[in-house]
Image (cartoon, rainbow, N blue to C red):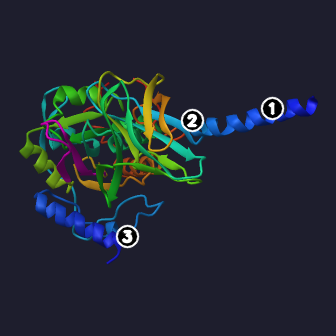
Amino acid sequence: MIARRFLLATVAALALVPLAEAAQDKVEIVEPWARASLSGRNSAAYMTIHNHGTEKDELIAASSPVARVVELHTHIMDGGVMRMRPVNAIEVNVGEPAVLRPGGLHVMLIDLTRDLKAGEKIPLTLRFRNAGERTIEVPVLAPGATGHGHGHGHGHRH
Amino acid sequence: MTTWQRIGLAIVTAAVAGGAAWLVVPAWLSPPKTHQVQVALPAGVTLGGPFALTDETGARVTNETFRGRFMLIYFGFTYCPDVCPTELAKMAAALDLLGAEAEEVVPILITVDPERDTPAALAQYTDLFHPRLVGLTGTEAEIAAAARAYRAYYAKVRTGPGPDEYTMDHSAFIYLMGRQGEFIALFNPQTTPEQMAEAMRRAIAAAPRVSTMQPQGGRS
């Protein structure tokens, strides 16, 4: 009886693990944040995306109710000239997290429908080629923030 | 040709093609060094000069308006989601590090997107970063003249068919100019606020305010 219960538990666990992996755990989004900005202007969201699955995935699109258009962008730094360009997808390789950060890859929030204020959270839906859609809550940091808990862009007193 | 040489060549080619002013700095042809504080200019090359623009209150200003104080200048635009906020925040952080001496320095954002960056738009945007940050705009010709004086590169890049669907490529340097508008230092995106503050501190110490000068009161 004990053995049978154990067996059942094992079968249940085995059945659940792949399901959970497929739906949730394959792609993990760590430390997302977005910049405070003004209605009608643009902002950017940053994060680190881990791929715990067994095959390569790609972030292919994103959307948010706070922006009329959301695009995936990168920056090409030509010496001292910054050129921002859209990209079709951001690769998320197994064991090699995709790092979206200032001055590089980012999710660009274009034509904001309202002000984004430091301290609030905004919903952001990310679409992955394999892992499907994930909606996350993204904390909004100061306009000049450079990341979570470090960097120079503290909120400025007025 | 190395990648960096190609990039350097591409900048010059783009700048010539676009008819815009640009910075030709040999340092660009080598990869940026992590601890590179300032960009060295080739012998004989200087930056800065007269400009006539409109400030965020709608008032006409020139380089003479700021004479007697240091200027910390950045060329950017308010629709810039990433690089401009980062650089403007660095300027603000550097000024904070300076403490009371920061009063000697006027932080300035000159827009490279005068089409969208009206004085009102700049006023709203600059407040996000520093209460004293001054936004300057002007006609296309006035902005082009200012950029030429500072050898700042910018170019409009269409992102869609709509009139508003464009972004701006632009050089991301910060300029420190002296009390007479003379060039002192050029900072790149690798420069930290600490390094910038130190350069300003040295510049202020080398040219302390003349006591007979008008007190710089009245600014908030």
B108 in magenta: no
Q: Are marks 3 and 2 in contact (CB under 8 Å)?
A: no
Which label sits in the foreground, 1 or 3? 1
Circle 3: residue type = Ser
Circle 1: residue type = Ala
Chain letter for mark 3 = B
Q: Are marks 1 and 3 on the same chain?
A: no
Query: Which numbered tag is attached to residue B30?
Result: 3
Q: Nearer the viewer, residue A138 or B143?
A: A138
Picture coordinates of residue A69, whole percent (x, y): 29, 33
Residue B196 seen: yes
Q: In the rendered view, does B107 fall on the left or right side of A23?
A: left
Picture coordinates of residue A57, whole percent (x, y): 49, 49
Query: Which region of the structure is painted magenta?
Result: B154-172
* Residue topped by disc 1: A9
Which label sits in the foreground, 3 or 2? 2
CA–CA distance in space, label 3 to label 2: 46 Å
Chain letter for mark 1 = A
Q: In the rendered view, does B153 fall on the left or right side of B176?
A: left
Picture coordinates of residue A125, whole percent (x, y): 43, 31
Which image quarter is the N terminus of chain B in? bottom left
* Mark 2 crowdedness (10 Å alpha carbons): few <14, some 14-19, many ≥20: some
CA–CA distance in space, label 1 to label 3: 61 Å
Q: Quadrant of residue A123?
A: top left
CA–CA distance in space, label 1 to label 2: 21 Å
Q: Are marks 3 and 2 on the same chain?
A: no
B169 in magenta: yes
Q: Nearer the viewer, residue A95 or A20?
A: A20
Q: Are marks 1 and 2 in contact (CB under 8 Å)?
A: no
Point 23% across, 63% down: residue: B11
* Residue topped by disc 2: A23
Point 6% across, 46% down: residue: B141
